[in-house]
Image (cartoon, rainbow, N blue to C red):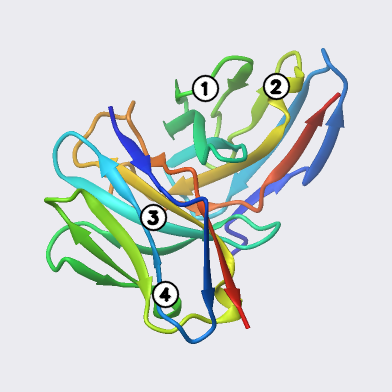
Amino acid sequence: NAGVTQTPKFQVLKTGQSMTLQCAQDMNHEYMSWYRQDPGMGLRLIHYSVGAGITDQGEVPNGYNVSRSTTEDFPLRLLSAAPSQTSVYFCASTVDDSGANVLTFGAGSRLTVL
Amino acid sequence: AQSVAQPEDQVNVAEGNPLTVKCTYSVSGNPYLFWYVQYPNRGLQFLLKYITGDNLVKGSYGFEAEFNKSQTSFHLKKPSALVSDSALYFCAVRAYRDNYGQNFVFGPGTRLSVLP
């Protein structure tokens, strides 16, 4: 049982390049989400999904795209990278979206955009 | 809108002394409150949560938190700090029965340093 797995751990991009951050969970969790962590700002929600085929925007969705074709996978796509997207990205999942459930986080993906 | 404040960027405490990391929140309706800890170069790990019931919640690694509805606070505490408790601590809130759009809201984090 690996929990939540994120790849890659580190990535450097040039402005304008595109890439996909991968997130996979093996716990059969319905709810998955992507956060970005910036110093002094905590974690901010980018996109989330409450099940396969269902996604929605969070607090800071601009410049990012997601899809949820399976329960296990929730990739985050950067369409045209900008320096403002330099951050640490965390994927998280939980059993359902009742509100009381604990999030399980991946180890994070550190992205630098030059 | 939901919000979480952690008024201290940094808390320093000597090993063996009690520690407190402060959190205040704003939410419509009854809150679900959480504390997570992040060790260097790691993801966040769950410490404890308040849903309902007893205002004093006990969690992992000897941590506890006190929910105070009148002060809208959820301070994290530990009677005797360890050097290994040094980490970044996040408070988070979720509104009870909110719609999917609100989700979890995290505070900015407080860095705890326990000095030997």
User: Callout 4: residue from which chain?
Assistant: B
Mark 2 vs mark 1, CA separation in Å: 12 Å
Where residue B51 sits in the image (x, y, percent)?
21, 56
User: Callout 2: residue from which chain?
Assistant: A
Neighbour tally class for label 4: few under 14, some 14-19, many 20 plus, Cα within 10 Å: few
Disc 4 target residue: B60
User: Callout 1: residue from which chain?
Assistant: A
Residue drawn at the location 41% of the way across and 48% of the way down:
B6
Looking at the picture, does residue A113 appear above or below residue A106? above
Mark 2 vs mark 3, CA separation in Å: 29 Å
Secondary structure beneath dot 1 equals: loop
User: Are marks 4 and 3 in one subunit?
Assistant: no
Q: Earlier in the sequence, mark 1 or mark 3?
A: 1
For the image shown, how many numbered marks are present on the structure? 4
Disc 1 target residue: A60
Mark 4 vs mark 1, CA separation in Å: 31 Å
Tag nearer the camera, 2 or 4:
2
User: Callout 3: residue from which chain?
Assistant: A
Secondary structure beneath dot 3 equals: loop
User: Are marks 1 and 3 in one subunit?
Assistant: yes
Q: Hey, what amino acid is under mark 3?
A: Val
Q: Earlier in the sequence, mark 2 or mark 1?
A: 1
**Which label sits on residue B67?**
none
Where residue A43 sits in the image (x, y, percent)?
52, 39
Disc 2 target residue: A84
Disc 3 target residue: A102
